[in-house]
Image (spheres, rainbow, N blue to C red):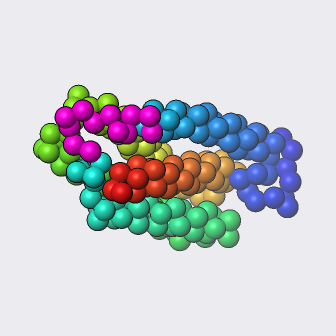
Amino acid sequence: MKLDNTLPLEYRSEENSNRIFGFWLFLGAEIVLFSTLFAVYLTLWNRTGSGPTGTDIFELKGVLIETFLLLTSSFTCGLAIHSMRLGLKKPSLVFFGITLLLGLGFLGVEIAEFVTYVHEGATLQTSAFLSSLFVLLGTHGAHVTLGLLWGAGIMIQISREGFTMDTSNKSFIFSLYWHFLDVVWIFIFSFVYLKGLM
């Protein structure tokens, strides 16, 4: 195992660098997945049949709350990684905890939004527009759920083992994943909600 002490802890071995590179490749595949879902949505967004349109069901207040929660969680995730690089275990865990709480809040608002849609008669079966909407938002929400479980596992590892090359590498890779979800949300906010509210 080749060590380079001039690099941040998460990059200090060739294996760790390869893991990070491999995760970038995985994110490339995720970009293809979400690009496909966006392409389907943008093709079907006006295929509402007799069902409601985006203007009928989208509510700006809830979307702004979701956006605030997720973007703030990206900031606190960055602070967690910064604290990790400074070797500050407790602040890093606090910032990771805040990140996960904000993500949980985002998920709660999104679930409430889905429940409201269904009560208003907007379901997967109602129209092609709603099918593509639910699949796109549901896929993103499933990724956030996975991120919450993953982040909780990393917090447990850090609290037990501290910052090792392994835990630092896992934490950094998790931060890449979490920032990626925020970038996807910005596209959802812009091309789904803002477009739908116009």
**Left or right relative to 67: residue 56:** left
Q: Residue at x 81, y 42 (%)?
A: 14
Residue 12 visible somewhere in the drawing: yes
Q: Quadrant of the N terminus?
A: top right
Residue 148 vs residue 91, the one in the foreground: 148
Q: Residue at x 53, y 71 (%)?
A: 91
Q: Position of residue 165 (x, y in %)?
A: 70, 51
Residue 175 vs residue 69, the one in the foreground: 69
**Up-down relation of residue 140 to residue 100 (above or below):** above
Q: Position of residue 156 (x, y in %)?
A: 47, 52
Which image quadrant is residue 67 in?
A: bottom left
Magenta span covers which residues?
42-53
Q: Residue at x 68, y 65 (%)?
A: 85
**Up-down relation of residue 126 to residue 84 (above or below):** above
**Up-down relation of residue 163 to residue 76 (above or below):** above
Prevailing secondary structure class for the magenta stretch in the rendered image: loop
| Magenta region includes residue 15 | no
**Up-down relation of residue 98 to residue 35 (above or below):** below
